[in-house]
Image (spheres, helix red, strand yellow):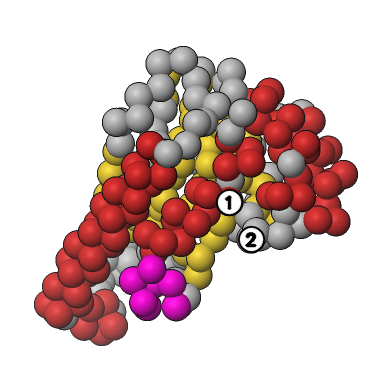
């Protein structure tokens, strides 16, 4: 629907932003830095993967990787890395590292399809290895929701085993994530790759035989 004529008028604040060339140059510098951080994370995860036996689905290819940049995840820019990456038929087995501008960084393990049953068993058999690591279980009705908090995620803590069991019992898939605020020292100090690798390692009790 076209905007009304008064909505098409640019406010003084909007005109200031439109004319601020440094703003757009800064944005491009940030994009490149985040891309480099994600590339470094991918190299580290590749090293970790070569030393680990995972409950991977049939047809899994450890060389597959995808890096994506977009502008409109709920109107905000985003960049993400999928590695390891497996989307084949009904099977999904993917570790996504998402930098969502204006929100947070998310490291998330997505599991759907044939590996879910064994991963769920591992979740409860090794629950206290996973709990207390800053991980959260997604409560959303879709794998592609990236918000955090009440109604969206449930922290995986030692005292919530029964509550988490109730959530997982009816799920044919699941997503477990760690969220990092954008003002975190992790980003100020360029430690995003280390945090991503640490998150992946914290999930190994879930993902290994």
| Secondary-structure class at tag 2 | loop
Circle 1 residue: 202
Quadrant of res 96: top left
Mark count: 2
Magenta span contains residue 189: yes
The spot of residue 124 in percent (x, y) is 78, 38
Specify start and end residues of the magenta stretch as a single range: 185-191
| Secondary-structure class at tag 1 | helix
Q: Is residue 164 above or below residue 74?
A: above
Q: How crowded is mark 2: few (under 14 residues within 10 Å), some or many (20 or more)?
A: some
Q: Which label sits in the foreground, 2 or 1? A: 1
Q: In this view, does 139 lie above or below 156?
A: above
Magenta span contains residue 153: no
Q: Are marks 2 and 1 in contact (CB under 8 Å)?
A: yes
Q: Residue at x 19, y 74 (%)?
A: 26
Circle 2 residue: 134
The spot of residue 187 in percent (x, y) is 39, 72
| Horizontal arrangement in the rendering, residue 135 relative to residue 43 (left or right) | right
Q: Residue at x 29, y 31 (%)?
A: 63
| Horizontal arrangement in the rendering, residue 29 relative to residue 120 (left or right) | left
The spot of residue 73 in percent (x, y) is 40, 51
Q: Can residue 76 be seen in this view?
A: no
**Who is closer to the viewer here, 149 or 180?**
180
Q: Can residue 38 be seen in this view?
A: yes
The spot of residue 39 in percent (x, y) is 26, 52
Q: Which residue is drawn at 12% across and 77% down?
A: 21
| Horizontal arrangement in the rendering, residue 112 relative to residue 44 (left or right) | right
Upstream in sequence: badge 2 or badge 1: 2
Quadrant of res 168: top right
């Amino acid at each position: 629907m076209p905007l009304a004529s008064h909505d098409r008028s640019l406010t003084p604040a909007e005109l200031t932003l439109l004319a601020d060339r440094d703003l757009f140059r800064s944005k491009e510098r940030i994009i490149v830095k985040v891309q480099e951080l994600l590339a470094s994370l991918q190299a580290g995860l590749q090293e970790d993967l070569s030393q680990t036996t995972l409950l991977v689905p049939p047809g899994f290819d450890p060389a597959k990787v995808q890096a994506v940049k977009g502008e409109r995840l709920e109107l905000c820019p985003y960049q993400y890395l999928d590695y390891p990456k497996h989307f084949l038929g009904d099977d999904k087995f993917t570790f996504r590292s998402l930098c969502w501008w204006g929100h947070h960084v998310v490291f998330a393990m997505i599991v759907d399809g044939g590996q879910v049953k064994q991963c769920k068993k591992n979740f409860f058999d090794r629950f206290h290895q996973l709990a207390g690591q800053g991980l959260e279980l997604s409560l959303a009705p879709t794998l592609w929701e990236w918000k955090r908090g009440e109604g969206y995620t449930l922290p995986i803590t030692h005292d919530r085993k029964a509550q988490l069991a109730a959530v997982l019992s009816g799920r044919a898939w699941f997503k477990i994530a760690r969220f990092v605020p954008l003002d975190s020292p992790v980003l100020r100090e360029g430690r995003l790759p280390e945090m991503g690798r640490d998150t992946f390692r914290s999930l190994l009790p879930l993902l290994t035989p």
